[in-house]
Amino acid sequence: MNNAFLKSYQTLQEIFSEQSFSSIALNKSLSLCKPQEKALVTKLVYGVLDNDILLQYIISKYVKKLPKGAVLLFLKMGVYCLKELSIPVYAVVNDIAELAKLTGDKRQVGFVNATLKHISATISTFDDYPTDFAENLSVRYSYPLWAVKKVIKDYGKEVAEQIISFKPQNATTMRFVGNLDCQQLSQEYGVKLTPTIFDDAFVVEGKLPQLDSNCTIQSLSSMAISRICAGFVKSSFLDCCSAPGGKGIYLKQLCPHVDVTCCDIHPHRVGLINSYASRMNTAVTTKVADMTQLDESMVSKFDTVLCDVPCSGFGVLDNRPDIKLFRQNEDISSLMKLQQAILQNCSNYVAVGGHLVYSTCTIFYNENGQNIKKFLNANPNFQLSAISLPQFPLANGQGTYQFLPHKDGIQGFYVAVLQRIS
Ligand SMILES: C[S@@+](CC[C@H](N)C(=O)[O-])C[C@H]1O[C@@H](n2cnc3c(N)ncnc32)[C@H](O)[C@@H]1O
């Protein structure tokens, strides 16, 4: 049996059945793979997840009744290989049929074999897409239909298509601390580094270096939020939803004189902040706290407060293809309630004259502009304040800004800066 196919199937099976984080399930599998199998397993797992709706749609056009469970997954893997990978057709059909023997049902093996042969004959010219605009986008770009409709409502059809069709390059960025000579760092860490918009971050190509106190993986969008906060902070900073600590710890490194407090509701996630802070040789205060509940001891204690709230994650689909599979439209209203509760409660912790920064890694108006509008209506003692981020001239000087990958060349995230005026 093709071991890379078997490992890919087992990983996908775990992600689909347990709704696991794709990166965690994949890393577990890769640790059990031979070195030469890792690239194919990674490509196949991410490829099937990222193209799930399209693959299922194509299969539905070739069968009378859509199969379920393992058989559907074998077919998705097969169709992805036929469509996107340069593996000979006979090898795909044979190896996937071999995999189907795991069902222990000869009829299923025959069905998988015959269906893949049938699909392989015409897949290269397949063009039978839905005619409805939203359904068409949903299928072609494997984007859930409810989310397509939301993006169309928020941005209009033209921009919605640009947002949904955009395929970001899957680049890993690393942030370095200390002496930043790109050539020297490349040699020291044994990787190819390319400068980015931020002078302390580089795109890494090649095997990732061993992480130490001078180097960490961090997205440019996460760094941008800390840099915006660094533009306001004076002496005390509260990171309300902090785990695993990316933004709070970078803020501390940008502004070493500032007292940084990092909170999260989950004790094990506060543990992640502690270990990250210790690896980065950074001293921050950490606290387990439900930030929807008032803590009298923190009232008016901070000149800058960041609410990087839990969100639907539709701005970071490049890192998390599983979001497209498992997030439901119904989740948005409960997320909004939580986001509003955190923002409202944490506004109490901002000193008069200080700043409240609200951020998400999503692109939906409900979780972004609508929350800020509601907050400002209910809290006349806060007003929008200008974002300071010179690397992004379109955002710089605005009170709120929606970053979009196709337009800004960075992950989709939202930021609003509010000042407490009384
Ligand atoms: C978007 S993540 C934060 C990412 C983090 N700011 C970073 O840059 O590494 C949201 C975090 O909010 C936490 N959270 C969820 N509900 C919370 C609550 N009621 N109070 C405090 N933290 C909460 C989650 O555990 C999660 O770690």
Image (tube, rainbow, N blue to C red):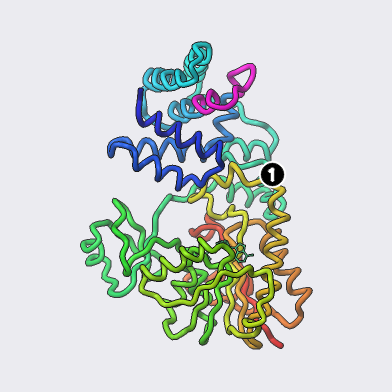
Name the residue nearer the viewer: 229 or 284: 284
Q: Eyeballing the image, is 212 above or below 30? A: below
x%, y% of residue 260? 50, 79
Report the number of discs: 1
Q: Eyeballing the image, is 319 above or below 244? A: above
* Residue 71: in magenta span: yes
Residue density around tag 1, few if under 14, some if 14–19, many if 20 or more, within 10 Å: some
* Residue beneath the point at 49% across and 11% down: 106
* Residue beneath the point at 51% across and 49% down: 320
* Residue 68: in magenta span: yes
- Is 149 left, or right, of 171 in this rendering? right
x%, y% of residue 356? 62, 77
Q: Is mark 1 within 8 Å of ligand 1?
A: no
* Rendering quarter of residue 367: bottom right
* Rendering quarter of residue 69: top right
Quadrant where ligand 1 appears: bottom right
Q: Quadrant of the N terminus?
A: top left
Q: Can residue 209 be seen at all in this image of the molecule?
A: yes
The residue singled out by tag 1 in the image is 146
x%, y% of residue 333? 73, 55
Amino acid type, callout 1: Trp
Q: Which residues are magenta?
A: 60-75
Q: Can residue 415 be seen at all in this image of the molecule?
A: no
Name the secondary structure under disc 1.
helix
Q: Quadrant of the C terminus?
A: bottom right
Q: Eyeballing the image, is 122 above or below 230? A: above
Q: Eyeballing the image, is 105 above or below 202? A: above
x%, y% of residue 27? 40, 45
- Is 83 left, or right, of 69 in this rendering? left
